[in-house]
Image: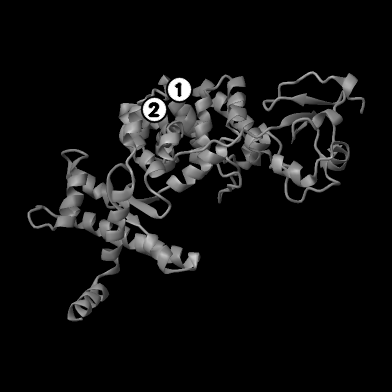
Amino acid sequence: MVRLVIIFIALILTPIHALQAKSQNETIHKSKNYSHFLNDPNNLIPKEFKAHPDIMPRVHFWFNIYTRFSSNDHVIHHTLHPWIIYEVVNTDFYYSKYKNKKTAKRKADAFVRKRKQHYKKIINRLARLKRFNKINKAELAVLNKIKHLGKNYKTHLWIARKNVRSQTGQNDFFHNGISASTEYLPHMELILKQHGLPKELASLTLVESSFNVKAKSKVGASGIWQIMPPTGKQYGIVNRTVDERNSPLKATLMAAKLMKFNYKQLKNWPLAITAYNNGIGNIRKSLRRARTNNPYVLINNHKRGAFGFASSNFYASFIAALYTNKYSKKIFKIKKLKPIALETVYFKNKTSLRHIIRHTGISLKKIKELNLDLKTRVGLSTYLPKRFKLFLPVGSAKKILNKNTYLVDVGGKKSKPNLSKNPRS
């Protein structure tokens, strides 16, 4: 009995971060490390997208974010050198303690902020010390990590003080996203191929949105490719009725056109892909400021103006996502979904949904499921705009084909309709 009382008192007096640390260590111990796949043992990665040695530490960091850590894991790391990890804080404790998810998240985020502040204080103290002969175990661990940056670690300590960041793990999002993408992937790869682009670029959707078809950002980007409104208007249709950024296939067509333009202008994939995030103008400006044409020098050494954390990590995160996708069967035990079966009808003129539904027998609900670019306000009386491409279940389009309405493939390539079997005009 006395022993039980002592244990109970000890638990009460144990700080919450100590209990949390135990949970965290158990989680890391149980989480598998899949880093050996970065060696591409099955040779699944084409030469042009092999992880370059100059950015391998950065790729390794993002690969772990995508494969090893969940959305309840917060990786506290150096902003400029993200592979320098101070701690991985697991917040499962809060989500099991509090039934209300908002409360749990608020408590978890507060704890992560405290841990970040803890490391800022440690680094600040180390930066001010002239000698390191009287530092504790936690300070020594941080110092040893910073020393990996080179001999001039005193300077690195001063820089590190203001560069403590936390990154949420994403392996649960990637598991769901890769699984969902298999429905659309064959169609997306066809679109990329038609534009003379590598099919591997489809993995960029995992970086942008974890292939969440409903993804919307605070700055207005939308869909799996997170296309901004001006880009959507430039490359597709965005109006009161339609937002083609939200259609996985039509957005892929927009992204393909943009990526092809980027590559033509910048001549290599690291810069072209980074420009998808940062814009060609900003990339050229950053190259001039860094006085280099080497994309890896830019990624590792230039941190000015618009070229911040997101830009310097965008290409590395794409490469990490590509490796994760290629080896997803072994990492996540992904079961591929059956590719979505559809046919694409091109309308030269405005056409009402009522007309389409009357002749095909397809419900409005089904049409909206296949055409995520149709906005929620769309109804039977809605007219689709000119030159609109509508996805329909296989076999239903023949009922509405005529000289102004014909089949195309997902990339927009025209098929010849057999009007003798489709008398309606």
> Which mark is first along the chain, 2 or 1?
1
Asked whether, in this view, residue 146 is left or right of residue 380, the answer is left
Q: Is residue 381 above or below residue 316?
A: below
Q: Residue at x 35, y 56 (%)?
A: 90
- Name the secondary structure under disc 2: helix
Q: CA distance from mark 1 to mark 2?
A: 9 Å
Q: In this rendering, does residue 58 appear at all?
A: yes
Q: Quadrant of the C terminus?
A: top right
Q: Residue at x 30, y 42 (%)?
A: 83
Identify residue for label 2. 295
Q: Are marks 1 and 2 in contact (CB under 8 Å)?
A: yes
| The quarter of the displayed image where residue 323 is located | top left
In x, y percent, where is residue 394?
A: 74, 31
- Name the secondary structure under disc 1: loop
Mark 1 neighbour class, 10 Å CA radius: few under 14, some 14 to 19, many 20 or more? some
In the image as oriented, which residue stretches furthest toward the left? Answer: 133
Q: Of the numbered discs in the image, which one, if any, rests on residue 208?
A: none
